[in-house]
Every structure is written in C-alpha cells, then in structure tokens.
Amino acid sequence: MISDEQRREAAASLRGSRGFFNSLPRTVLEPFIFDIFERVLECVGYTECNVFDYLADLVDRGECENVYDGSVQDSCDNGFLCSVCGCKVEDEEHYRVSGVWNYCPQCGRKVRHG
Ligand SMILES: [Zn+2]
C-alpha cells in the first residue's frame, strides 16, 4: 500500500522536474515522449507491477466501508470499523465519539456511505 508520505515525495519529485520539462522544445515533444515517461516513473518511485495500477493507487487511496456492528453488547452509537484495514474506533470512558466517518483514520480510504 502506498503511504501519504510516498505520495508527497512523488509530488515533490514531479514538481522538481519542472526544469526538465521546460527545457524541452514544446513544438516537438514526440521524440522525447519515452524520456518524459521514464522521468515520470522515476519521480513516482515506480519499480514493478502493472504501471497503471501503480499510478491509480498513487492518486486514489480507495474506498472502504464502516462495518462496525452497533447492535452487539457493549458497542457504542457511532463506532467505526474499517472493512479494509480493520481500524476500530469506539467510545471510551467519558469520551463519546461523534461526527461523520468520511475517511478511515488509519488507512485514509474514503468511507462509502449508503
Ligand atoms: Zn482503514
């Protein structure tokens, strides 16, 4: 799984390659397409596997569902259990969890609603 730190490093590396791109003649990019693609893959840290899956995972953290079962004994009203990474958040003594679970606090996936 790609971490947010890896995403930030890839973004910084891509932004650091502005000069490379700006040095190319804009009117005839075709002869440099391979060099550009190779540079992009180097910036994002691509090493193996399907390059399209890798790039998709880099830009999209994916989705999960809240599978917390609030009907069992000792469960709370607004608990969270990530369907992908298993992160669990519940009420603690004197502290009630409230709000809407839009993202998993551990893996960062967007929580699908409805
Ligand atoms: Zn998660």
Image (spheres, grey):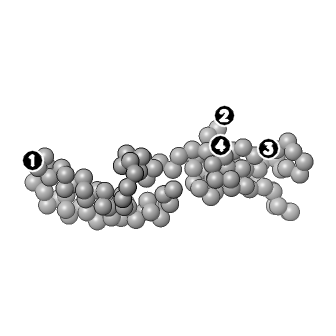
Discs 3, 1 touching: Cβ within 8 Å? no
Q: Give the side of residue 58 with respect to residue 86, left or right.
A: left
Would you say 17 lies left or right of 112 here?
left
Q: Quadrant of residue 9?
A: bottom left
| Residue that appears at 85% across and 50% down | 75
> Mark 1 to mark 2: distance in Å?
49 Å
The amino acid type found where label 4 is placed reads: Glu
The disc, 4 or 1, on the residue closer to the chain's N-terminal end is 1
Q: Earlier in the sequence, mark 3 or mark 1?
A: 1
Marks 3/1: CA–CA distance:
59 Å
Please name the residue shown 50% across and 60% down the image.
Answer: 3
Numbered label attached to residue 114: 2
Q: At numbered mark 4, what does the secondary structure look like: helix, strand or loop?
A: strand
Q: Position of residue 110 (x, y in %)?
A: 58, 46
Residue under numbered circle 4: 65
Secondary structure of residue under mark 2: loop
Using the image, tell me which numbered label, if any, was put on residue 69: 3
Depicted 40 relative to depicted 53: above or below? below
Within 10 Å of disc 4 (Cα), the crowding (few <14, some 14-19, many 20+) is many
Residue drawn at (36%, 49%), measured in percent from left and top? 51
